[in-house]
Image (spheres, rainbow, N blue to C red):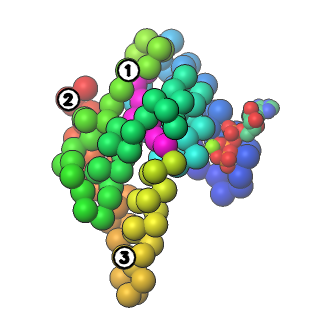
Amino acid sequence: MQNFKGGVGKSTVTTHLAHYFGVQGYRVLVVDCDSQATTTTLFGFNPHFNIAREQTLYPYLSIDPTQTDLLYAVQKTPWPNVDLIPSNLELFDVEYELAASGADGGSVLASRFRKLKRGLQGSRARL
Ligand SMILES: Nc1ncnc2c1ncn2[C@@H]1O[C@H](COP(=O)(O)OP(=O)(O)OP(=O)(O)O)[C@@H](O)[C@H]1O
Ligand SMILES: [Mg+2]
């Protein structure tokens, strides 16, 4: 879900779509890329108390990654057929690290989006 305006329902629509597709029988993986973690909260997790940085995208997307695929981060949710890669405020460190590493003019942002795509494609067959 992408929209450049804030507060217009991105997280809400993401969550309801996931529930809808789950009820339809699809296997759904919701990936919370927002350190605000609204979607994670809507799935019943308290991002501050129930989620550690190591359970978010951070170890995979960090400038010094410690994970080479995304399977470590996939969690069951209370909803059948719907799994979640959760987020918490610490995921903001990725945004900071990637922006800081581009301070010399080169940007790693695009390559990080490609890495996320590769990680999701790689997980697909193994979940
Ligand atoms: N269809 C709707 N009708 C009325 N209120 C809605 C609707 N969809 C979402 N909301 C409410 O609008 C507010 C913002 O929704 P949400 O958090 O999903 O937006 P967002 O685009 O993800 O925001 P952010 O930019 O902060 O990530 C929430 O309080 C949500 O409950
Ligand atoms: Mg949101």
Residue under label 1: 76
Disc nearer the start of the sequence (2/1): 1
Residue under label 3: 101
Q: Is mark 3 within 8 Å of ligand 1?
A: no
Q: Secondary structure at mark 3?
A: helix
Q: Are marks 2 and 1 in contact (CB under 8 Å)?
A: no
Q: Quadrant of the N terminus?
A: top right
Q: Secondary structure at mark 1?
A: strand
**Residue under the point 35% across and 50% down:** 58
Using the rendered image of the protein, determine whether residue 35 is visible from the camera's viewpoint: yes
Q: Is residue 81 left or right of residue 67?
A: right
Read off the magenta span.
82-88
User: Residue 22 appears at what percent x and percent y?
Assistant: 47, 17
Residue under label 2: 126
Q: Quadrant of the C terminus?
A: top left
Report the amino acid beneath label 3: Ser
Q: CA distance from mark 3 to mark 2?
A: 32 Å
Q: CA distance from mark 1 to mark 3?
A: 34 Å
